[in-house]
Amino acid sequence: MKKYNLILIFVFIFMVVTSSSVNAAYSTSGYRPNIDLYRAPNDKYTVYDVAKAGTYWDRWHAMHAFTPSGDSATTIDQAKDYAYCIEPGINALTGDHTYQQTDNPAELGIDPEKVKKANLYGYYGYRYNGQYGDAWYAATQLLIWTVFDDGLYSRSYLADLIGSDYVPRDDLDDEMQTISNLANSHYTVPSFADSSNKSVLMGNKLTLVDNNNVLDRYDIEYNSEYIDVQKSGNTLIITPKKVGNNINIKFKKEDTRYNKQPTVLVSTIGGSDPSDPAYYESQDFMTIGTVESVYADLYITVVGIPITIQKLDADTKVGRPVADAKLAGAVYGVYDSNGREVTRLTLDNNGRAKSDYMQPGNYTVKEISAPEGYVLSNTTYSILLDTSNLEPTFYVEDEVIKGNIKIYKKLQKTDYDSEINLSGAQFKATLKSDTSKVYYSNLSGTDGICTINNLPYGT
């Protein structure tokens, strides 16, 4: 944008009204006009320095600055309130004029959609997000004029007070483009909003880039129990904290600047005395009001890693109990790196248990209570949950309880006095619950004693 000093004239109306028809008194005693809009011989609209205007120029329109009576503002930035002309070609006249005022433009024959569009320019133009100064106000006014006169944009010029007589309107293109982009994207939501559910794994981060470049204009709300969300420009960074489904992130764009609707004031003509200001039409104008709120949603599913524990018999190395022992009912505690118990798992009939989704990290697993027929294990198992395996299974072992049987073989007394050799006798033990399970003894010695060792738990 070209750098130059501008002293512009602005429309400024100050009034307090409660009815649809008001008598508006305003004064030019404060911020004085320095630039008028002239109609050149070639019928182009030209913003031109009054001091340099030749006699052949016809005054067509002036941008005036009006302040409340007694207001000492000397710049538009100092003014407490301001307005915009919506009727290029009609001057704003001093004196008392009657206006019809409404926040329903159709009542006065003005297209509500034009007012809505002009209001967006006014909202995102002068004084929005630090956009102060003459250039921003002039750019806003020019854009509002284009709503009501769509040919004005290509026929407007700006006077350079310290350089040549004419400066192309392009000197305001940067400001006008910025305002247009903001206004035209008011209803645009972030590109990833209102889309399908997105997933993020515990321990990872989900980074989303808004291709519509509007994220920075939205506030966000979310459930901090499950996620943390950081917004940096047009990038959203989501860090999961707890496993959950359909966690809502709400995007909100709500007006906090205005608590009123945009207002249109239309001048009326009355009286027959040319000395009466009411005899003449003054320009119509509007004040800026609130804009519509815009909302959008994004839903996140936080995915964790479940732990599956499979118990094995220490002797057979398979996931089936031995004899009458059981794998079901064993209880294991799962502990985080700080030794805090995070969950307990009770094994089913197959010796298996699966946890809820857990965060990646280092854990230890230890048996709290053994199942029937097994010895409580003192082993502490270290496990690592990471994204390389989203369905890990960890194996644990227990020793079955074992016992020995000693059998004494005796003979009843007979009439024979000779010694009888008792060696060679053999016994077997059969599991009552499963007769196919047979455990044999060693052969007895000469003393008739035999043993069956390491019998597993059972009857």
Image: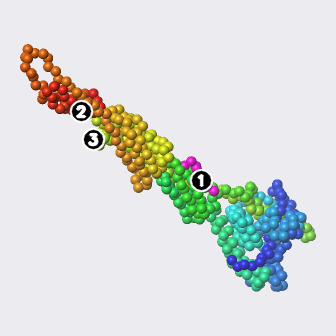
Looking at marks 3 and 1 on the same chain, the residue that comes earlier in the sequence is marked by 1
| Residue 225 sits inside the magenta stretch | yes
Return the mark for residue 316. Answer: 3
Q: Where is residue 440 in the image (x, y as percent from the top left)?
A: 19, 32
**Mark 3 burial class by Cα count in 10 Å: few <14, some 14-19, many 20+:** few
Q: Position of residue 68 (x, y in %)?
A: 86, 64
Q: What residue type is labelled 1?
A: Lys
Q: Which of 248 and 10 is in front in this view?
A: 248
Looking at marks 2 and 3 on the same chain, the residue that comes earlier in the sequence is marked by 3
Q: In this view, does 22 lie above or below 140?
A: above
Q: Viewer-nearest of labels 2 and 3?
A: 2
Q: Mark 1 points at which residue?
A: 250
Q: In this view, does 232 lie above or below 343?
A: below
Return the mark for residue 453. Answer: 2
Q: In this view, does 338 lie to the left or right of 353?
A: right
**Mark 1 burial class by Cα count in 10 Å: few <14, some 14-19, many 20+:** some
Query: What residue do we see at 78% from left, 65% from top?
Result: 83
